[in-house]
Amino acid sequence: MIENIKRENSGIRLNVDAKIFDILKDHNISIFKTAGDIVHLERFSERTVEVPVQDARTKHLIHLLAVQMKKFTSKYPKLLD
C-alpha cells in the first residue's frame, strides 16, 4: 500500500515502518483510501455486556416488601426516623 501511495504521489516523502499495514491488520484495523491523499482507518470491536434482569417472581417479592414497609411506616411512624 505504501508503494502504491509513493507511485501515485511522487513528490510525497514517507518515513514509516514498512510493516505498518501488517501491524494495523493484526490489530483488526481496516485501511481505505478515499479521495485525494486521505487514508481512512477504521476499527470495529464488539463487546458483550451482561445486564442482570429481574424475573417476575423477584419483582413481585419486591412489590410485596414495599407494600408491607408502607403499612408498617404508616402504623409505626417512628420507623421513618
Image: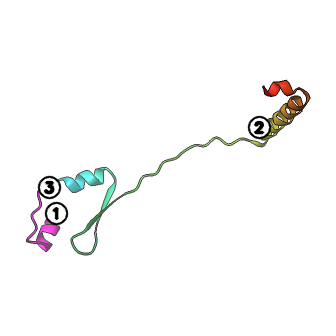
Residue 51, horizontal then vertical, whole percent: 61, 43
- Mark earlier in primary sequence (3, 1): 1
Above or below for 1 versus 45:
below
Rendering coords of residue 56 (x, y %): 78, 43
Which secondary structure lies at badge 2?
helix
Question: Taking 16 as reference, is 52 above or below it?
Answer: above
> Which circle marks residue 58 in the picture?
2
Q: Earlier in the sequence, mark 3 or mark 2?
A: 3
The amino acid type found where label 1 is placed reads: Ile
Question: Mark 3 is on which residue type?
Answer: Val
Q: Quadrant of residue 44?
A: bottom left
- Give the left or right position of residue 76, taking residue 28 as reference: right
Is disc 3 in contact with disc 2, using a CB cutoff of under 8 Å? no
User: Do labels 3 and 1 touch, CB within 8 Å?
Assistant: yes
Q: Which residue is mark 1?
A: 2
Disc sitting over residue 42 in the figure = none
Alpha carbons under labels 2 and 1: distance apart: 60 Å
Query: Mostly what secondary structure, the magenta segment?
Result: loop
Quadrant location, the C terminus: top right
Q: Amino acid at mark 2?
A: Thr
Number of numbered discs overlaid on the protein picture: 3
Residue at the image point whose x is 16% and y is 63% from the top: 2
Q: CA distance from mark 3 to mark 2?
A: 59 Å
Q: Residues within 10 Å of mark 2 (few under 14, many from 20)?
A: few
Q: Which span is picked out in magenta?
A: 3-18
Q: Looking at the image, which is closer to me, 67 or 8?
A: 67
Q: Which tag, 2 or 1, sits closer to the chain's start?
A: 1
Residue 76 in percent (x, y) is at: 88, 26
Q: Which mark is on residue 16?
A: 3
- The question of residue 7 being in magenta is answered with yes
**Viewer-proximal residue, 20 or 40?**
40
